[in-house]
Image (tube, coloured by chain):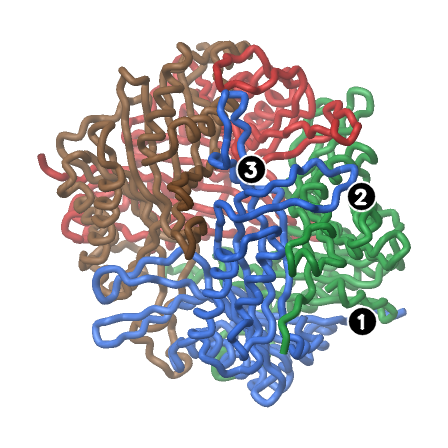
Chain colours: A red, B green, C brown, D blue
Amino acid sequence: MAIVLGPNRYGKAEIRVVRVERDGVVHRIKDLNVSVSLSGAMDEVHLTGDNAAVLTTDTQKNTVFAFAKKYGIGEIEDFGLLLARHFVDSQPTIHHARVEIREYTWDRISGPHSFIRDGGEIRTALVRSDGSDGPESVVSGLTDLVLLNSTGSEFHGFAEDEYTTLAPTDDRILATAVTAWWRHRGTAASWGESYRAARAGLLAGFAETHSLSLQQTLYEMGRRVLDGQPGLCEVRMSMPNKHHFLVDLEPFGMDNDNEVYFAADRPYGLIEGSVLTDDAPPVPPHWH
Amino acid sequence: MAIVLGPNRYGKAEIRVVRVERDGVVHRIKDLNVSVSLSGAMDEVHLTGDNAAVLTTDTQKNTVFAFAKKYGIGEIEDFGLLLARHFVDSQPTIHHARVEIREYTWDRISGPHSFIRDGGEIRTALVRSDGSDGPESVVSGLTDLVLLNSTGSEFHGFAEDEYTTLAPTDDRILATAVTAWWRHRGTAASWGESYRAARAGLLAGFAETHSLSLQQTLYEMGRRVLDGQPGLCEVRMSMPNKHHFLVDLEPFGMDNDNEVYFAADRPYGLIEGSVLTDDAPPVPPHWH
Amino acid sequence: MAIVLGPNRYGKAEIRVVRVERDGVVHRIKDLNVSVSLSGAMDEVHLTGDNAAVLTTDTQKNTVFAFAKKYGIGEIEDFGLLLARHFVDSQPTIHHARVEIREYTWDRISGPHSFIRDGGEIRTALVRSDGSDGPESVVSGLTDLVLLNSTGSEFHGFAEDEYTTLAPTDDRILATAVTAWWRHRGTAASWGESYRAARAGLLAGFAETHSLSLQQTLYEMGRRVLDGQPGLCEVRMSMPNKHHFLVDLEPFGMDNDNEVYFAADRPYGLIEGSVLTDDAPPVPPHWH
Amino acid sequence: MAIVLGPNRYGKAEIRVVRVERDGVVHRIKDLNVSVSLSGAMDEVHLTGDNAAVLTTDTQKNTVFAFAKKYGIGEIEDFGLLLARHFVDSQPTIHHARVEIREYTWDRISGPHSFIRDGGEIRTALVRSDGSDGPESVVSGLTDLVLLNSTGSEFHGFAEDEYTTLAPTDDRILATAVTAWWRHRGTAASWGESYRAARAGLLAGFAETHSLSLQQTLYEMGRRVLDGQPGLCEVRMSMPNKHHFLVDLEPFGMDNDNEVYFAADRPYGLIEGSVLTDDAPPVPPHWH
């Protein structure tokens, strides 16, 4: 029985790059958080500390800034592909690159160069590449999309055992913070359009489903993202059930007809699931 | 030399109450985080543990929920006044009440009862009352209003000493996260209108000031909040200077004409100041 | 091309249970954060909202509290196994249970029932079970173990490309916050002893390795955890490189002989890797 | 009625400086988070953007690093005084300096230069100076000291009104996270000794008080800090009541004899108070 090196990766995480682009006096800004992760022929650095195979994380950071200048930042999926391919192609020892990007959005206020941070959900992209002629994958997504239905949600008919005390309900608040990832079949798409359609599908699935369980809502949200977007093959979602408990006002001589709720922090339900097309190609195992 | 009890207060912090109001099938929601703090004749509880003077923090919490039902939640300033007066009037031992409220805003999505959390700034109110016939104060505000000017900001002509290395600049990014509090002269106002006007003043002051320092911008923002709102007498602001450093791209043979920035976390500048009218009444000393 | 349900799971996350145990007047406390995740025959709840297969997350929470009473809380691995087996065995629809536990440790202060929270690393366990007669897995670990070597770390000989500006160094600060997981071969062990040995191996590997790269240190830490613990088959580690940058004091007429550092927040390096025995059994695919 | 500038201050916040000191091969490290805040004749920078009076926050940061080299870092109170006096004396426009320091402690692991972060409470200091010949103040403290008594705490005999539902109890868990500040009479003291004595007083006051209310415990903790330290004149404390609710196990046929608790997050009680000597000098008003 010998001790050996297993799967590994390394990179620079959370590179905060802001790019200003000018159209005359009118400015546009792109505000990203970029994390790079590389892997490949990295046995020596682990076993002997020989760094010859290592493109340093400092260089990765420099590359992100230099590429922001050289190519500008358009859609984050394209920027991620550009970076991922570059890293794999630049060193023979680097076989796989993973670039994860979070994009913070800003809205314009009065004037051509003043902005207010849109504090809502964050757009995300996760790009993997084994080089421009190897397998590649683009996953788009969003996180921190906080949604609430104040009615139209029931929960009953569940399994019961000796530890069950929950009362069934035919009217509750359903609230969640959506993290979603949708996988593209290829590496070229109208990323912005696809993003807006996917986001609209999530919202519609949430708002328009009369919900008997958060799982049902999740499935319907995923279905609507895939529906009508043939370029997508899978949606993964992670959705906490942000409990809103009805406050017992009876001791004060009041009823509570679904009017006053306590918004709890912990514990919370956590519902995770994937919706996919039956022809979705598998993700390469080294990408998990 | 004796050891004695000094100033003290107690209360329930961060009561998360959500109130649903119905207009037929159309719902409105109010989502608050309420913190109560009471003081008065509290020597005994500190010195001997006799709780006879103490309205428990649990009761304070119950009261917030019960009042949300009984009176509904309109403007947070009114809800705060209602609570503060109640607490002072309800027990002879409670002389001062302080109610701080944070309001999270939600936007409507499709349908009459579906909402998306607006993740931007949070509206706030801070109400103090010595009872309905004692001195009272209402302060309104906001926090987490994140703003950025991509040009129109200079910084030069500053004092220099032996530890100064900063180069003067005539074009930089100016970014901040505004926390602002504005003090009302009275306890009755069109709170919502006043809030919208104050917020507009902050935005205009930030966007329209060609800035030679963040202090100058802060002062102008405060001035615009007061200007045209005779019901206000003071604005206090706390504004971090969220540094965006120009990346040195010269090693890669590139210039950087204010295009690529690194958004730094720490350390950051912190600018705090007050703008007031020359007839602003002082805040009672026990309220600091 | 049809749209179908993919992998999914659900459960109650972050159940904060505190258990007091008495030995006469002397108390012991266990303070846990338990997250449960279940999966199995859950198609109907996603597709139609039929909850008959669902053991509610509320029941899961109740079970954690009830088991804390019924069985007490000893080693978190045993408590996790007890819960995981129970959930799988209790409903025919539940085929897999995953229980993740974080344990906060407290030290005794003067007296038999007074404690101070030890704010350092958190002990963790991750238990998976397909039922008491199915495959099972126990992984133990820790997180937030923050370590620093103030010398004994070099970094040079790395690959260079056109974006490389980093200077090689033969003396730097090496600092990290270790998250580590070690996988046991079986489901019975002296968990506490094994934990102490694994933790000691991590510390010794970090402190005693003259480091040419963080990867080398990581590998050596993993190797020492496995070494002498035949009951273990794999260690996974995630270690940010918490950069400490030497401050340039030359403008002030001072040298800086590795004395004054700026501790940076972002970006940071992130090194992740696994060290395993060559006979380590694979983890079942549905457990990823 | 004119609009005028009110109180203001500015500075660099959260300067993360790490200082390595060598005693032969044995290293010691000091790890600080320093925040500077200056005020004085700052009208012009607010009103016209003239920065002539402004010692930049960048220079403040440089000064912290340079002083760490020049003077080393001993007790944080001394380091704060050194910085505060320097800032006031260096520019005629700067009349008041406030330096707040948080110190993260590290314990030694095996070997002369390897350390583990002690994740418990953080030692703090808050120094104010109007210059070396002006009024000065040193306040020492700690934060994040998390304490728990598993018995020896009662709560009953409190005021009741129509919103009171809390049941009195003669045995509950009392848990809190202490933030405390103690004010020194002068600017020279054995800071380290004083710190250890104050901390011991807080711990003893918490552990040895049979508590009828958290206020009583707070007062006793403060009293013990002052007692026997004639160099101190005031202690201020802020202590959340971290509620641990007894879980109702009756539905599962179990009693719960103070054994199983749910540790809640929000809302929480918040108890704040000051204990002082009757000859404590007042703090100058511009220092609030």
Residue type at numbered disc 2? Phe
Label 1 vs label 2: CA separation?
31 Å
In space, the residues marked 3 and 1 are separated at their CA atoms by 51 Å
Identify whether C235 is placed above or below B172: above
**Mark 1 = which residue?**
D4
Q: Chain of mark 3?
A: D
Q: Are marks 3 and 1 on the same chain?
A: yes
Q: Is residue A1 above or below residue B103?
A: above
Left or right of A209? Residue D159 is right
**Picture residue at 21% right of the left edge, 63% below the top:** D111
Chain name for mark 2: B
The residue carrying pointer 1 sits among few (fewer than 14), some (14 to 19) or many (20 or more) residues within 10 Å by Cα, namely some
Say what amino acid the circle numbered 1 marks.
Val
Give how far across and how far down residue B102 sits, in percent. Answer: 70, 46
Residue at point 41%, 81% (across, down): C252
Q: Residue at x 48, y 52 (%)?
A: D147
Q: Quadrant of the C terminus of chain D?
A: bottom right
Q: Which residue is more in the foreground, B82 or D54?
A: B82
Numbered label attached to residue D245 = 3
Q: Which residue is mark 2?
A: B79
Q: Nearer the viewer, mark 3 or mark 1?
A: 3
Say what secondary structure mark 3 lies in.
strand
Observer-nearest residue: D45 or C276?
Answer: C276
